[in-house]
Amino acid sequence: MDTPARRDWRTPAVTLAAGALLLAVSLGIRHTFGLFLAPMSQAHGWTREVFAFAIALQNLAWGVAQPFAGRIADRYGSGRVIVGGAFLYVLGLVLMALSRTGTLLALSAGLLIGIGLSGASITVVFGAVLRKTPPGRRSFAMGVAMSVGSLGQFVMLPAALTAIQSVGWMTTLLSLAVLGLLMFPLAAPLSEARGGGASRPAPMPLRAVLGEALSLPGFWLLCLGFFVCGFHVVFIATHLPAYLTDRGLGPSTGAAVLALVGLFNIAGTYTAGVLGGRRSKPGLLVALYLLRALVLSAFVLVPLTEGSAYVFGAAMGLLWLSTVPLTNGTVATLFGVENLALLGGIVFFFHQVGAFLGGWLGGRLFVLTGSYDVVWWMSVALAVVAALLNIPIRETPVARLRDRTEGAV
């Protein structure tokens, strides 16, 4: 008598919930790093460039490691990759708290946390979630996952600021490391059967995957546009609290503004996910980048007050990570989900190169000029360029997917 096959407990709903919560932890912790720039620099006598370089290196390491983490996750499942990434992330937080030199800060906050994030954040999690999600619900699922991840950013910022003021930056970092341990149990629902199951096509050779993607002009345009997103996000997250303090607003204002970014990002990413299932995702990206240019310009031109800073946080929050479900959704539409973590990782590499430059140039140009003005206007110009880059992109699946669809009819 045949034994009935056991039903996989990792249903689409369970996988989505675990992925969303994991993003809330990993992205929420990362979103607090800007709060540590001033107290750590003052405690160790560093210039802002020292801390800014470590965060920039973190983003570059994240980007370089992401395609490799994605390829392993695509071939062997996401669970083990997430566990490995979580281990490096937590270790990096502990060593960051113990850093006394710029070199150790670069190793911990830079390399270890950056490589850890490549395994325990957006691209690998999205790959696991989307392989479980029906095609018509994928954009929505990414919007939900990023919305919950944004909730983590909103909650952790005021909590981290309160902890820094109450128990100090070192104890706060160690507490965040303890919180990061939650990523280990959340990896279990995101694990996948080795080989992906009977319904999953045989893996494509790496050369074929790369050749297909890199021969498509739209893929390159998507990569270059996402570069700008990374520049914006890391420059603002790293330097905004210090910028507001320099302009006469207290450190609590900077934390509140970044918290507003996280709060309004919940609505922004959810809306982007919903609209991405109904409208052209590249078209929505064009609109998002143009709106960023307007918001950034207004923030620089309007006299800075506590109120204008809060309005800026809310407006940028709506546009903050809304690019993520739209960009990854476009990759999934063009190439399918079998190699999403790898191809999404390549796109994300460009995002992180932009992030490196946004984080590092913010500190470097401040040291050289005593002001952030050059970087603010650079951010405006790049937003316009990103909008123009997304205009020619068309959501037409590659021939391999079109042939598969026609063959199934």
Image: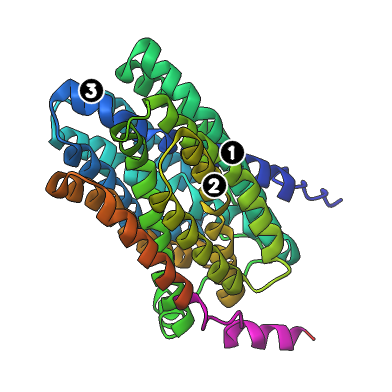
From the viewer's perspective, is residue 264 above or below residue 323?
above
State left or right for residue 155 relative to residue 103.
right
Residue 49, percent from left and from top: 18, 42
Circle 1 crowding by C-alpha within 10 Å: few under 14, some 14–19, many from 20: many
Amino acid at pointer 2: Gly
State left or right for residue 330 relative to residue 206.
right
- The residue tagged 2 is 317
Give the quadrant of residue 70: bottom left
Amino acid at pointer 3: Leu
Circle 2 crowding by C-alpha within 10 Å: few under 14, some 14–19, many from 20: many
- The residue tagged 1 is 263
Q: Are marks 2 and 1 in contact (CB under 8 Å)?
A: yes
Residue 71, percent from left and from top: 43, 62
State left or right for residue 369 relative to residue 188.
left
Q: Which mark is residue 98?
A: 3
From the viewer's perspective, is residue 213 above or below residue 41?
below
Task: Tell me the distance, in whole angstroms, between the alpha carbons under discs 2 and 3.
Answer: 32 Å
Residue at x-position 73% and y-position 69%: 278
